[in-house]
Image (tube, helix red, strand yellow):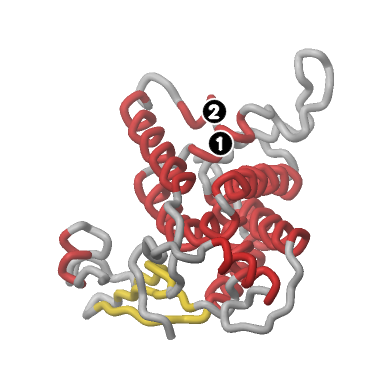
């Protein structure tokens, strides 16, 4: 059962009345059951949180984001004289686990928690880990190309999480996402089809990438590239026949249902809902 509005205010998820004038709208759950324990998601979220704590502690003496963030470096030559277009292969992975503050971390983990748990349930632990890392690499590569290789560190899990959004868009377009709204005078929740919310989110990122990427500290190109990577992954590996409410092919649904037979659901999204200076 979802927590009450007073509980959300007490834990700082939404501000108390009069503390903030800007409206808030973000996802908090889905209407799909989860049948397996999302170990990979738990580890990724714990690792991102731990690294952010370490970054906060050591930042006065060591700039973790500058040293471990992904820097394309297009046009710069390595010590051996070769062109370094995609930057260090090491930081293209480490940059996925860095964040630029608590708000950045919470926002990313919230989106990841909403869609990532169900995707891991659908793909399995090993395939989901490959999917997540692959989308993150594709997002960083897209950022390197779109930004023209500007030597600015790119940090955050948002590129890989955008891939999860793209994968969820392909697998469960007709599922329902539970949204939390806050307007200052009150708060509440409502459901919206996944294809509407994710489609609008992608359109916004695409527009911002074309008009504001150069002037913003948000790597919109990484978001767009990650979303496309997630969609392409699902398109390449599954036979699509949108013949059911979840938007999954009949063949895939049968295989998935058979593999989960006899298992009790462990939950859905964040809360189970009834069916109906770096680029960040």
x then y, percent, for residue 184:
25, 75
Mark 1 closeness class: few <14, some 14–19, many ≥20 residues within 10 Å: many
Please state which of residues 213 and 271 is positioned toward the viewer in this rendering.
Answer: 271
Could you tell me how far apart the alpha carbons at marks 1 and 2 are, in whole angstroms?
A: 6 Å
Please state which of residues 261 and 225 is positioned toward the viewer in this rendering.
Answer: 261
* Residue found farthest to the front: 262
Q: If you read the primary sequence from the N terminus, does the residue marked by circle 1 or circle 2 appear first? A: 2
Q: Is residue 231 above or below residue 32?
A: above
Q: Secondary structure at mark 2?
A: helix
x then y, percent, for residue 118:
50, 61
Q: Is residue 51 above or below residue 164?
A: above
x then y, percent, for residue 75:
79, 31
Task: Determine the residue positioned at 37% across, 61% down.
Answer: 266
Tag 1 and tag 2, C-beta contact below 8 Å: yes
Q: Is residue 152 above or below residue 258?
A: above
Q: Is residue 1 left or right of residue 117?
A: left
Q: Is residue 92 above or below residue 140?
A: above
Please state which of residues 108 and 152 is positioned toward the viewer in this rendering.
Answer: 108
Q: Is residue 151 left or right of residue 39?
A: right
* Residue found farthest to the top: 80
Mark 2 closeness class: few <14, some 14–19, many ≥20 residues within 10 Å: many
Q: Quadrant of residue 243?
A: bottom right
Residue denoted by label 1: 95
* Residue found farthest to the right: 82
x then y, percent, for residue 88:
68, 27
Residue denoted by label 2: 68
Q: Quadrant of residue 15?
A: bottom left
Q: Secondary structure at mark 1?
A: helix
Q: Is residue 56 left or right of residue 86?
A: left
Task: Determine the residue positioned at 44% across, 46% down.
Answer: 39
Task: Determine the residue positioned at 74% across, 35% down.
Answer: 86
Please state which of residues 160 and 22 is positioned toward the viewer in this rendering.
Answer: 160
């Amino acid at each position: 059962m979802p927590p009450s509005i007073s509980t959300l205010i007490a834990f700082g998820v939404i501000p108390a009345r009069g503390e903030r004038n800007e409206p808030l709208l973000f996802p908090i759950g889905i209407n799909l059951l989860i049948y397996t324990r999302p170990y990979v998601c738990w580890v990724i979220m714990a690792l991102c949180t731990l690294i952010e704590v370490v970054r906060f502690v050591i930042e006065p003496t060591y700039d973790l984001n500058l040293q471990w963030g992904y820097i394309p470096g297009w046009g710069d030559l390595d010590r051996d004289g070769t062109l370094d277009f995609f930057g260090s292969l090491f930081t293209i992975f480490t940059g996925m686990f860095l964040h630029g503050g608590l708000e950045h971390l919470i926002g990313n983990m919230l989106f990841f928690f909403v869609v990532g748990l169900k995707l891991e349930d659908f793909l399995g632990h090993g395939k989901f880990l490959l999917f997540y890392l692959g989308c993150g690499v594709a997002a960083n590569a897209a950022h390197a190309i779109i930004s023209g290789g500007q030597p600015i560190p790119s940090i955050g899990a948002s590129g890989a999480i955008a891939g999860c959004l793209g994968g969820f868009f392909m697998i469960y377009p007709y599922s329902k996402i539970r949204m939390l709204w806050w307007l200052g005078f009150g708060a509440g929740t409502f459901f919206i089809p996944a294809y509407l919310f994710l489609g609008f989110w992608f359109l916004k990122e695409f527009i911002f990438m074309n008009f504001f990427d150069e002037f913003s500290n948000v790597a919109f190109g990484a978001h767009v590239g990650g979303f496309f990577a997630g969609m392409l992954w699902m398109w390449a590996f599954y036979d699509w026949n949108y013949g059911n409410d979840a938007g999954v092919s009949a063949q895939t649904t049968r295989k998935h249902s058979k593999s989960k037979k006899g298992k009790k659901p462990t939950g859905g999204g964040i809360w189970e809902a009834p069916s109906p200076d770096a680029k960040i």
